[in-house]
Image (cartoon, rainbow, N blue to C red):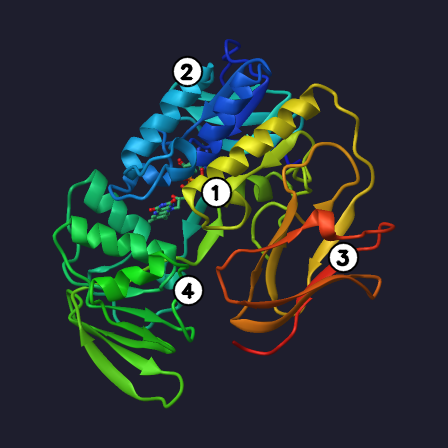
Amino acid sequence: MNAPAAFLPVVETPAETADVLIVGGGPTGLAAAARLAALGVGRVVLLERQTETGGVPRHCGHSPFGMREFSRIMGGRAYGRRLTETALAAGAHIRLRHSVLAVEAGPSLLIASPEGVYRCRARAVLLATGARETTRAGLLASGSRPSGIINTAALQDMVYLRHRRPVRNPVIVGTELVAMSAILTMRGAGGTVAALIESGPKPVARRPFRWLPPLLRIPVHCGVEIADIIGASQVEGVKIRNFTDGSVREIACDGVLFSGRFTPEAALLRLSGGRIAPGTGGPEIDDHARTSLPGVYAAGNALRGAETAGWCWAEGRRVAKVIATDLAGAAADTGAIAVHAGEGIKYVYPQKLTAGGQKSFSHLELRLSDWICGELSVTQSGVCLYNTRISSGPERRVRIPRAQLPISGDAPLVISVGKGKS
Ligand SMILES: Cc1cc2nc3c(=O)[nH]c(=O)nc-3n(C[C@H](O)[C@H](O)[C@H](O)COP(=O)(O)OP(=O)(O)OC[C@H]3O[C@@H](n4cnc5c(N)ncnc54)[C@H](O)[C@@H]3O)c2cc1C
């Protein structure tokens, strides 16, 4: 692991000790903290850089959250509070305004707190740092820079935490789950949505979320891109270009919301010398959720970008159980089989399979790079271990049960999908 930044004066705070340190107080970290504490692994300390826990849901005034976890539909803020109360009640310790700066050998964390910078060593570390949205610059959207161009996370932050309404009738770029969240946020703030635009051939969000725009009579334009953003000081409209015939049309609006295209928040691991998986952009992990840094695990959106909160919560709980088992000195697993994303596969995780021990992942989790209707297959040394017909698209969950893979030897697995487009 790399040395921490040398210019930071490190203060002594011998009071902080931990068996497990969790970085990030979103649904993943809070779920893991609650379960680890309940399993009695010792002292569990969760570090959150913000002034409150809850992660992304804390600035989502809308629902739906909590169905899987609490069997009821909750707003994001109430959900975040409930997860926090559950972790505290189980005996976990929460440190707010604590930013983790580096992961060091041990494992040990370098932490910036209101009192100064200090180190804390633990028997295990869980990275639950979430994901961040791609900015407009990152999306290479053209046009001048009038105000009213933001991403969904910034919109949520302004509406729910600062009680401001930066736009009244924006166009939303993207049609995945988070775009639906932006629609709800706009409605909650008393605004409307001029249109949704999508570069792919159809909306990305799964049912029932993709029913929202037609229900609210919001036009959805697929197979188009933004050709220009019009307006000097404030957005006045956008020009969209159709990929098929090249035609350009104008939509009046006062803002452009870029939604989705999440990147795992993996800077901590990268700077600390951990391996990053090229497909996901998150930590490379094995089926226990162990990263390439000894004693360091990762879970939630830090692994691959946006999933639902309930999915991340369940993942946090599963990884917590595995950490507890590993700390109890369970029989070590053997070998490691690499899993590669082949043709038509955007990414797959875990990127390594082991032969023994308790697993965090019973499935290979993957995403397709395009809308595809064809044969999904897993091969090992050219031998087909699994194949199935599939019709799916980007951002849709595709899962292959590991139990159905008759793996032999330690040659890598390659997952690929045939080329026919749906
Ligand atoms: C706009 C938007 C709307 C959404 N709406 C819904 C919805 O309606 N329903 C639903 O189920 N899901 C929704 N989701 C998805 C859901 O919010 C996420 O799946 C979930 O929050 C992921 O949980 P997480 O704990 O992995 O990450 P996060 O919630 O992102 O939490 C990560 C935490 O780690 C902290 N952190 C990061 N780095 C550090 C560091 N170095 N030191 C200390 N702390 C750190 C962050 O401050 C943050 O609090 C939405 C997502 C977005 C972006």
Q: Residue furthest left?
A: 190
Which quadrant: the N terminus? Answer: top right
- From the image, tell me which residue sits under label 3: 413
Q: Amino acid at mark 3?
A: Leu
- Give the mark count: 4
What type is the residue that disc 4 sits on? Val
Q: How far apart are the alpha carbons under marks 3 and 1?
A: 25 Å
Identify the secondary structure beneath mark 4: loop
- Ligand 1 visible in quadrant: top left
Identify the residue under disc 4: 204
Local crowd size for mark 2, using a 10 Å CA cut-off: few (<14), some (14–19), many (≥20): few
Q: Nearer the viewer, residue 373 or 100?
A: 373
Q: Tell me whether the residue at label 4 lies in contact with that at label 3, contact meaning CB atoms closer than 8 angstroms.
A: no
Does mark 1's beta carbon lie closer than 8 Å to ligand 1?
yes
- Residue at 63 percent of width and 32 percent of height: 296
Q: Position of residue 370 (x, y in %)?
A: 53, 70
